[in-house]
Amino acid sequence: MPAASTVLRAPQVPLVLIASQVGRLPTAAAPLALLLFARQSVSLAMAGIVVAVFTAGMAVTAPLLARGIDRWRQPPVLYGSASLSAVGYLIAALSAGRPVFLLAGAALAGMGTPPLEACLRALWPDLVAAADVTAAYALDIALQEVIFVVGPLVTLAAVAAAGPAAALIVAAVLQLAGVAAFVAAPATRRWRGQPAHRHWAGPLRVPRLATLVLGIACVGAAVGSIPVVLTGYAEAAGDRGLTGWLLACQALGALVSGLLYTRAKPGSLRRLPMLAACFTVLYLPLLLVPAPGLMYLLQFISGFGLPPLLTAAFLAADRLAPPGTAVEAFAWIFTAFTVGSATGAALAGPLTDATIRTGFALAPLAGLLAITAMAVTAGRRPPAER
């Protein structure tokens, strides 16, 4: 991919990209690590609450941490949040048999999760030529799929080697190591937020950006529903192991799509509803609920719609965010996707209990809402690019 290779050849890009990937691994590794650790002493329902507390902590504090970065600098906030998160993982790892400490540790680990995703996207305009920013976003989003494949494998390896508590410690170490390497990049240390008038609502005071965030929440709901429905599908097929392989196929499709999209031009906000429509349409074939052989192919295809849509959403957030709020705007995209994903998973459970086809219907329905939100976001000419 020529565009991707151009981005990777830019100075500092390999360092910040790899460091960000390592530092973000716990977002995919920690939920499974917490679940396996909690199951040693509490019920499955309680273990689910522990994971939910961790996820909620991430979703709530990401915009607040990003707002601090917009006002000050990246290194202090990244170091401080990663340290808080590491303390949370340690408390959780030492909490055997004490659910209150486990919940507290999970909450701190989530709340302290450093906003590396938003920080990296704020750096791209300083790291690559203006013509390559879209390719950089697409490459970053594509490589995120590697996180969600490797993260659980890291957890399983740590559990096999030294037990569930070790997986929590490994998550903390990876996060701290990723942050340290990311902050070592000169671009990270040089970056400064733009001086600007501050408002309590941050970038969400812009109606079109708030609508974009709502649209991304709907996208997250669609994506978050699929693992739950696939679990029901795999159980009905008599092989629970199908779930992981089917999700891996979807992640592979997203990786391929993201790499292909690195060649795309930036485009205007009017691209958003079109990409949301493509994202939605690719989920419709799942309603056929075919045999596993064909389902692998449909899952692979369904992964193609997400990276282009997220890339366009981050570009739109950068255009719409008021000066001095770019990092927080990116963090709101992350939070919206996370909250939407959790909501989609919660709704998919009872729908899948009814029928598997009904469960699969949630993704395109959420996609329709996303199309509407993206159409509103793209309804007028965007403000002049900064």
Image: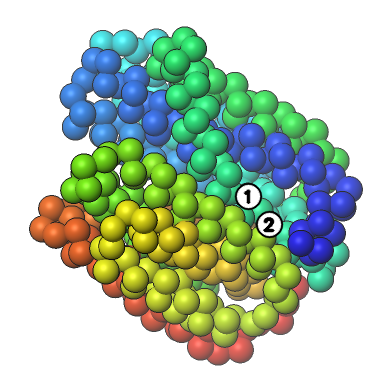
Helix, strand or loop for disc 2: helix
Tell me how the rendering is colored: rainbow
Whether label 2 touches label 1, CB < 8 Å: yes
Q: CA distance from mark 2 to mark 1?
A: 6 Å
Say above or below: 106 vs 268.
above
The kind of residue on which mark 2 rests is Leu
Relative placement, left or right, of 237 versus 143 is: left
Q: Position of residue 303 (x, y in %)?
A: 48, 61
Q: Position of residue 50 (x, y in %)?
A: 30, 30
Measuring 47% from the left and 76% from the top, which residue is drawn there? 278
In which quadrant will I find the C terminus? bottom right
Q: Which residue is mark 1?
A: 143
In which quadrant will I find the N terminus? bottom right
Q: Which residue is mark 2?
A: 139
Say above or below: 118 vs 26.
below
Residue toward you, 380 or 245:
245
Residue toward you, 345 or 176:
345
Say above or below: 210 vs 12.
below
Could you classify mark 1 by the number of other residues whose Cα lies within 10 Å: few (under 14), some (14-19), or many (20 or more)? many
Measuring 52% from the left and 27% from the top, which residue is drawn there? 154
The kind of residue on which mark 1 rests is Leu
Say above or below: 174 vs 150.
above
Residue toward you, 26 or 80:
26
Relative placement, left or right, of 376 versus 324 is: left
